[in-house]
Image (cartoon, rainbow, N blue to C red):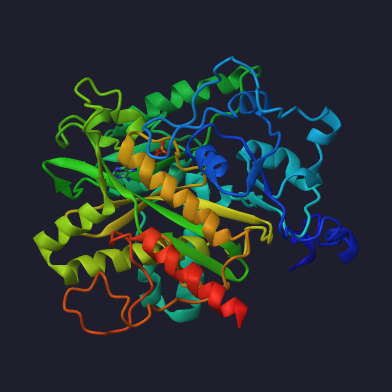
Amino acid sequence: MSKNTRVPGYMQSKAARNARGIIGDREIRFKCSLQNTILDVLRGRPGWQEVPGPNFQQQNMQQNSRPAAGSQTSTQPPDGKGNKTGYQPVPPIQRNSDGDWDFYWCDREWLHQNYDTMFLHEHQKILHFRNHYELTRKNLMVKNLKRLKKQTEREQGKSEGLSFDFHPTTYELPSEYHIFVEEFKRNPGITWIMKPAAKSQGKGIFLFRRLKDITDWKKGEYQPLTDTTREVPETYVVQRYIENPYLIGGRKFDIRIYVLVVSYNPLKVWLYRDGFARFSNTRFSLDSIEDAYVHLTNVSVQKNAPDYDPEKGCKWSTLRLRQYLSAKHGSEAVKKVFKGIDNIITKGLQSVQKIIINDKHCFEMYGYDILLDDDLKPWLIEINASPSLTASGKEDYELKFGLLNDLLNVLDLENRLTGKEKRIGGWDLLWDDGPVLADDGNMECTTNGTSVTTANSFLGCHNDRKRQLREIYTSAQAIKKT
Ligand code: ADP
């Protein structure tokens, strides 16, 4: 680790680092900033104990209100009946102590404010790496990918650079406005999409075909600069709009995929089997580029559509999607799609591997958004560091509940596993300082049943997580005994 990437905690003496010792047999103390599925998972985990967090007042009142796993809504609002458990708020001074928790599902703002002054004990785990935005801001993601592509072309030749051609042509505004205009003029008539670099949920996005639309926007956005009391204009990206998305039932969709990074140095990446396709509610057409319900597949947008049916929702599991595509195009074509998605996942992470401040206390669960075009080519749309954990229905709740429980199984604060597992519940180890290959016999997604070695990647495959967990815990116990 280079000097400028050192974080507090590494420079402490061993005695100081281990002052609390490893967790051992005592309960695991957690904090959580969110009031959704993750809080349910943490509260429901045997041997885990909640300690005061930023939402302490609310959490304290909710001690007895956890809904049963599988219920539609996540954590209930406080019932106002007070605390009957004898669980008392700790005095403020203790509340600020970094040593009070073993696991913290914090929000990004909290991390930014506290990371640089935080002392972490050996065993503590916290969500987010310090500069996760290098990958999750739309402009920085593209910048980092372009840089690694250039480096790869330099070192390994032009043809290797082709494996980076999975994000639509993108420019940062205002800084690359003039280059964009040249590109715009070279491609008359195509559709472009404008997106604020740091916003989410479809906020501030619009499509356009005429330069005039953007100059009007530009005036509105940048004129205030003459007014010194106004803030600096927001950074946007302008991106080539994918005009030929793969449609099912005439509707556009994108795929949400969950990826867990437990270390950047060496890079260690897990891919969750389940994810979902998010459909737009309205049939796709290029005639109505101003209609967000046609073009933006975010659930936060679609749920406001006038004919949105909350019962039906607008999601398909990746299992269902994979089965649909296999039936329609055959398993070889589908394998190619999913191999392309694996490439996007790893290239995305490699593009920031040397930039992210690695810290053994940190982990990140990313939500990748991938769009397929009608040639079945996967495109990277964006990567989120805080993918929504609020469930939109029973099935969605079950997916997220399993996903998060298995994430805790991978982190293994309980120290029940061997550390050599390639699959833990629904998570498969995709990259461990290099590509991970599947074991023979682990071929659920091949159709001909032949035992060829493939990547340890099972996105959209059957997720029998509970059976698998039973097996690995039994086997880990046996190994530990010997
Ligand atoms: P946000 O962070 O606000 O969700 P995204 O970049 O994910 O922004 O875009 C929102 C939605 O807009 C995506 O889910 C996708 O449906 C659509 N979209 C975004 N970029 C493109 C593109 N280049 N081509 C086609 N559709 C796009």
| 478 sits to left or right of 334 | right
Q: Taking 390 as reference, is 10 left or right?
A: right
| In this picture, residue 33 sits left or right of residue 426 | right
Query: What residue sits 58% from the left and 14% below the top?
Result: 80
- Viewer-proximal residue among 262 and 434: 262
Who's the residue at 45% across and 23% down the image?
219
Front in this rendered view, residue 375 or 388: 388
- Is 67 above or below relative to 276? above
Tell me if residue 203 can be seen: yes
Task: Judge whether 404 appears above or below 281 on screen.
Answer: below
Q: Quadrant of ligand 1?
A: top left
Say which residue appears at 36% left-offset and 75% top-offset.
455
Q: Position of residue 88 (x, y in %)?
A: 74, 27
Which picture quadrant has residue 98?
Answer: top right
Check the picture and name the quadrant holding the N terminus.
Answer: bottom right
Q: Residue furthest top?
A: 80
Residue at the spot x=36%, y=76% of the render?
Answer: 159
| Location of residue 391 by image quarter | top left
Q: Specify whether residue 212 is in view.
A: no
Q: How many marks?
A: 0
Name the foreground residue: 415 vs 15: 415
Q: Position of residue 454 (x, y in %)?
A: 33, 78
Percent x, y of residue 178: 44, 43
Relative image position of residue 283 (x, y in whole percent): 14, 35
